[in-house]
Every structure is written in structure tokens, then in C-alpha cells.
Amino acid sequence: MPTLETPNSGTDANLPPTASGGDASTREMAKDAQTYDVEDSEPELKSDKEAPDGARKVESPMVAYLEQIFTKRLDAMKSMVKRLPGVAPPIRKSNPDSYADTPFTDEITLIEMPMKFSFPNIKAYDGTTDPDDRVAQYRQRMLAVALPKGSREATMCKGLGSTLTGPALQWYINILSRSIAFFAVLSDKFVEQFASSRDLEKTSDSLYKILQHRAEPLRGYIARFSQEKVAIPECSIPTAISAFKRGLLPDGDLYKKLTKYQCKTKEDVLSRAWAQVKWEEDVASRAKAQQKPDSKTIRPDRTERDEKPSQRPARNSGN
């Protein structure tokens, strides 16, 4: 009775079945064929394992670049952590080419400044006041200087930096290189940068905020009101007249006159106001002049005493 082979019966279980009584050479050839199949499959597995290594080689430049960026940022964060409160920040290394950078194009940069030119004396701007007013001041100062027509544009562009300080100067230094070709472009960027410091535009209604104080002379009130009115563009005359009368003391003589006699022009209002100022100042000066100093006993001068004859009785010569 033939024997049955099971998968666990021996190492030859996976060999193909052979006829009973077959020679051993056939079985050896089957083993060799199986060995060759295993050896042929190993390179395929190795090639699969080597694929990620090849991918790493392709990604290595990008990884190195990212590691360099992360290292720099980490060093910067460490330096910030190591800084103590109140200690000056570390000195930054200057770029060797930074001194050759200029915010102006070649049309401005290549024009030489006049040899005998000196910038007008003007207070340095730090970015805290109205930039529009600053540009107007700088423009008028530069127009007052005699400059050749061909170099005026370049001189106005190059001269602005010498009138700046603090944050304004730092902004000027950090302007994009070779981005300014005209002074108009530079002034627009300047006003845009410091727009937060611009003064709010005043209207005629803001004149109602000017009020005369109880102890304030009429001359002082007129001066404050006129200063506020000048700062208002296209001020409404009827509004200005109404605000001027509203700001006066209600028990004052000028308020009573302006209420009784309506004035339609600012000249009429000012004429009545200055007439009242003259009257008030004249009354004040007369009152001051009438104040007499306290009477004091005036001692006679020594020379006057010496000139008076002696009132002592004469001595008798017979005695």
C-alpha cells in the first residue's frame, strides 16, 4: 500500500510528485530550480529597498537648504532668549555692498551735486508731525536756493535724507533700491509712510469750540479765534461770525452790540471787536495809573540838615 505525503512530512514536501521508484537525480534538479527562483527574486527585493535611498539622494539638497534656514532661525531665537532686559541688541553685520545701494535711479544718482551748495537749515523730522506740512516746508526752502535747472530734481531727492532723523531716517535708508526717479514719487511715499501723523482736516464747525475765558482779555480771545480760523480751508463766513459771537462772554459789551446790530461781513465784526479792545485797554490803563503808592514819611536829606542854623542856645562867654 503506497504512503501519502503531507506538507509536514519532510523538507521534500514541496517538491513535485514523482513516480514511485524514480531516481534521485530528478529530485535534485527540482531543488536546484527552486534555489534559482529564490536567488532571482532577491535582487528584486533589494532594488525595492534601494528606491527610498535614491529618493533621499534626490531630496538631499532641499533638506540641507531647509536645515540651514531652520538653524539660522533657531540661532536667532536663542540669541533673543539670551538677551537680558535693558541690554542693547547685538551689533548686526553690515552687507559689504550696502554702501553702494541707493534708492534713486541712475538718472538721479549720476547727477553731481553743486560744489558750493549747502542744504537749508531746517529742523530734523522724526515722523511725529504732519508729513504734508513737512514736505511743503522742505520744498519752499529748496526753491529759495539758487540751483541749476538740470540738477534741481536730483538735489531735492538727495537732500531729503539729510533732514530726517529717528524712524524717518530709518525708513529713508530702507527704501527699495533704485525705485525713485522723481521727487514727486519720493514725497508721495513719504506722506504715505507717515500718514498716521497727519493732522485731521478742520471744518468751520470746529470754531464753536473756541470760547472766551472769564478772566481772558478780548484781545487774547480774538487772537485764538483767528489762529483757529486760518487753519480751516474754505471757512464759511456766516459760520465764523456766528461762532465768534457765540464764544464771547454773554455779559460782555461786545456780545451785546453784536446781538443788537447784526454784522454780515467779517470786516464789520472785527471793526467792532477792535473798537471794544481799545476801550477796554484804555480803561485798564487809566485804572492802573490812578492807583497811588502808599504814602511814606520822607526823611530829610543830611545836607539839608547841615544847612539849617543850629537851634541850640549860645553859651555865655562870661561864664
Image (spheres, helix red, strand yellow):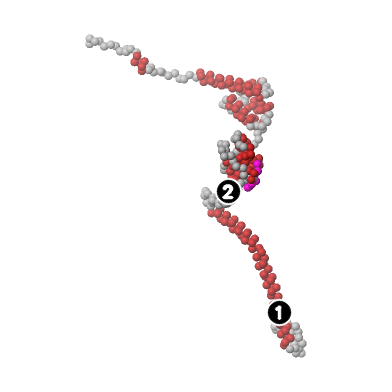
Q: Does the magenta stretch include residue 178?
A: yes
Residue pictured at 34% horizontal, 13% vertical: 308
Q: CA–CA distance between discs 1 and 2?
A: 73 Å
The amino acid pointed to by label 2 is Tyr
Q: Is residue 140 magenta?
A: no
Q: What stretch is highlighted in magenta?
A: 176-182
Q: Splitting the image into 4 quarters, where does residue 307 fall? A: top left
Q: Splitting the image into 4 quarters, where does residue 222 fall? A: top right
Residue pictured at 74% horizontal, 84% vertical: 5
Check disc 1 and report the residue beneath it: 36
Residue pictured at 64% horizontal, 44% vertical: 107
The amino acid pointed to by label 1 is Tyr
Check disc 2 and report the residue beneath it: 99
> Quadrant where the N terminus lies?
bottom right
Crowding around mark 1 (Cα neighbors within 10 Å: few <14, some 14 to 19, many 20+) is: few
Residue 160, percent from left and from top:
60, 40
Mark 1 vs mark 2: in front: 2
